[in-house]
Amino acid sequence: FLRKDQAAALNPPLRKKDRFIQQQQDKALWQALRQCRKALADEYGIPPFQVLSDASLMDMMEKHPSNLSELLDVHGIGDVKLERFGADFLAVLRDYPL
């Protein structure tokens, strides 16, 4: 019981208005990341899932990296994808600050 109380005190629940704003920001970022992935896929002539999977995009949304080294911590991004696509995805993330 104490752990739950401590966790609740550290992370108070968002008010309804704040949750709505956060959901709208998340939706906008999700769509922007998907559009970036689609544009890169078209440019390289490959299917979008070969650029990054949905799971990778979700992990990117959670971690919200701000530089290339942080982007390497995102699921599904290695050296090759970082070199090819990293700058494009970071540009999108910069447009959606936390």
Image: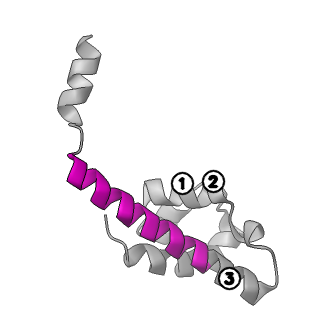
Q: Is residue 11 left or right of residue 61?
A: left
In terms of sequence position, does the residue under pointer 1 or pointer 3 come before the other?
Answer: 3
Q: Residues within 10 Å of mark 2 (few under 14, many from 20)?
A: few
Residue 91 at x, y = what percent?
Answer: 46, 81
Quarter of the image that includes the N terminus: top left
What amino acid is found at the position of numbered circle 1 in the picture?
Asp
Q: Residue furthest top?
A: 1
Q: Residues within 10 Å of mark 3 (few under 14, many from 20)?
A: many
Q: Residues within 10 Å of mark 1 (few under 14, many from 20)?
A: some
Q: Secondary structure at mark 2?
A: helix
Q: Residue at x 23, y 54 (%)?
A: 18
What amino acid is found at the position of numbered circle 3 in the picture?
Leu
Gap in Å between the C-alphas at discs 1 and 2? 6 Å
Residue annotated with mark 3? 40
In terms of sequence position, does the residue under pointer 2 or pointer 3 come before the other?
Answer: 3
Question: Are the residues at dot 2 and dot 3 in contact (C-beta closer than 8 Å)?
Answer: no
Question: Are the residues at dot 1 and dot 2 in contact (C-beta closer than 8 Å)?
Answer: yes
